[in-house]
């Protein structure tokens, strides 16, 4: 018996080329509803979703992310970690203030936003839509915060471009389970691990055979490239977190 949920999950691929067809209000509402029914830490629902339909704001996001193709998506969502709403529901005292500004609640909001995003991706794919999750909004976090008038105790986590696919890229092979799934204890690997070597070869073959942007690259080379990026590119994230009121420490002070 075919399991349609597993079929959807195991056939995920990022889509960056879309038709000109926009999402309908019903489709947008369905994706948001899927997000709202995802797991949420302590049922606190610590995220908000902004639909970005203003062409000027989409153009700015295209500039910030370096991916102007997002302007042609069927819809664009900004996923926001949000303790501001809960701050309006709680009395202002030392305990609630410390908790709302804490690292714990920041992470809870980030988790909630990320889980909601994945629910939207899966729901969209079940409807025949495609999407790309975009962490590249963090390339200029302060500008994103200003662009969308994000109040204290909120933080932009991810962008999500969704639409009707105009492409069907090949599935990108994932790491073998032996390298990501362990029993009872963490299992370190080395750069010359034979399982990793086999995966490097598989990734090289994938990049050689895919329909566009062919290149010579192993997974190891990809990671080295990622870790070699200028760390100053997103150095302002910590500044932005402080600006938004997150203290990055325990709510309990000596």
Image (cartoon, helix red, strand yellow):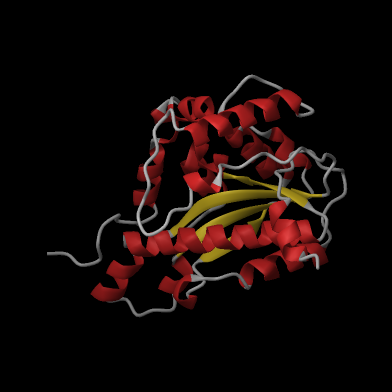
Quarter of the rendering occupied by the C terminus: bottom left
Find residue 32 and report its horizontal and vertical position in percent: 68, 66
At x 44% / y 78%, what residue is drawn?
89
Find residue 56 and report its horizontal and vertical position in percent: 69, 41
Quarter of the rendering occupied by the N terminus: bottom right
Q: Is residue 137 left or right of residue 30?
A: left
Q: Is residue 137 left or right of residue 230?
A: right
- Residue 249 quadrant: bottom left
Find residue 20 and report its horizontal and vertical position in percent: 87, 44
At x 44% / y 76%, what residue is drawn?
42
At x 41% / y 42%, what residue is drawn?
237
Marks counted in the figure total 0
- Residue 181 sits above or below residue 15 on the image: below
- Residue 111 sits above or below residue 72 on the image: below
> Is 148 or 212 nearer to us in this picture?
212
At x 49% / y 68%, what residue is drawn?
46
Find residue 14 and report its horizontal and vertical position in percent: 70, 43
Q: Is residue 35 visible?
A: yes
Q: Residue furthest left?
A: 254
């Amino acid at each position: 018996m075919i399991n349609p949920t597993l079929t959807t999950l195991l056939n995920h691929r990022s889509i960056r080329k879309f038709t000109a067809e926009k999402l309908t209000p019903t489709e947008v509402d369905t994706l948001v509803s899927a997000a709202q029914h995802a797991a949420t830490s302590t049922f606190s629902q610590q995220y908000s979703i902004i639909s970005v339909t203003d062409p000027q704001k989409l153009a700015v996001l295209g500039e910030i992310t370096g991916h102007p193709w997002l302007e042609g998506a069927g819809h664009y969502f900004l996923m926001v970690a949000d303790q501001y709403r809960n701050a309006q529901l709680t009395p202002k005292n030392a305990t609630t203030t410390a908790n709302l500004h804490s690292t714990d609640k920041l992470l809870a909001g980030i988790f909630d936003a990320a889980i909601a995003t994945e629910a939207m991706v899966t729901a969209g794919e079940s409807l025949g839509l495609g999407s790309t999750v975009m962490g590249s909004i963090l390339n200029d976090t302060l500008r994103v915060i200003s662009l969308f008038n994000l109040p204290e105790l909120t933080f932009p986590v991810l962008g999500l471009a969704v639409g009707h696919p105009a492409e069907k890229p090949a599935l990108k092979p994932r790491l073998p389970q032996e390298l990501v799934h362990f029993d009872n204890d963490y299992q370190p690997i080395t750069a010359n691990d034979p399982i990793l070597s086999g995966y490097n070869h598989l990734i090289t073959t994938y990049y050689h055979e895919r329909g566009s942007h062919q290149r010579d690259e192993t997974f190891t080379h990809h990671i080295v490239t990622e870790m070699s990026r200028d760390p100053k590119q997103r150095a302002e994230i910590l500044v932005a977190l402080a600006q938004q009121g997150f203290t990055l420490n325990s709510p309990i002070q000596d």
